[in-house]
Image (cartoon, helix red, strand yellow):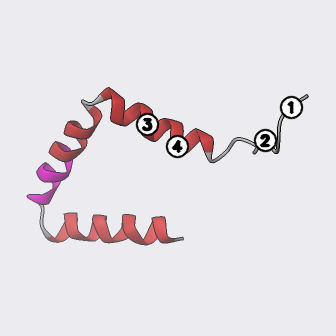
Amino acid sequence: MMRWLLLGALLGLLLAYPPLLALVVAAAAAVLSKPLVVAFAAGLAVRSHLPRVRGWAR
């Protein structure tokens, strides 16, 4: 739910201030140009959907 509110706020700001689009695109390009950051974020996203292992497997 919070994700949709933040997305709506971002889209509202982009509609109100069109030059912000260039700033958002530049920030996204800067983050995506760093493979370590992208891999870390992908790992966190995948980890949240994996089942949790409890204790040692024997």
Span of residues in magenta: 19-25
Q: Residues within 10 Å of mark 1 (few under 14, many from 20)?
A: few
Residue at the farthest left position: 19
Q: Dominant secondary structure of the magenta stretch?
A: helix
Determine the residue positioned at 19% across, 46% down. 27
Task: Using the rendered view, name the quadrant where residue 55 is placed.
Answer: top right
Q: Earlier in the sequence, mark 1 or mark 4?
A: 4
Mark linked to residue 57: 1
- Asked if labels 3 and 4 touch by Cβ distance under 8 angstroms, the answer is yes
Q: Earlier in the sequence, mark 4 or mark 2?
A: 4
Q: Nearer the viewer, residue 44 or 9?
A: 44
The amino acid beneath tag 3 is Phe
Real-space Cα separation, disc 1 to disc 3, in angstroms: 26 Å
Q: Quadrant of the N terminus?
A: bottom right
- Label count reads 4
Q: Nearer the viewer, residue 21 or 3?
A: 3
What residue did someone put label 3 on? Answer: 40
The amino acid beneath tag 2 is Val
What residue did someone put label 4 on? Answer: 44
Q: Look at the numbered disc 2 and give the secondary structure of its residue.
A: loop
Determine the residue positioned at 21% across, 63% down. 14
Asked if 10 appears above or below 43 in the picture, the reply is below
Mark linked to residue 46: none
| Foreground label between 1 and 4 | 1
- Asked if labels 1 and 2 touch by Cβ distance under 8 angstroms, the answer is yes
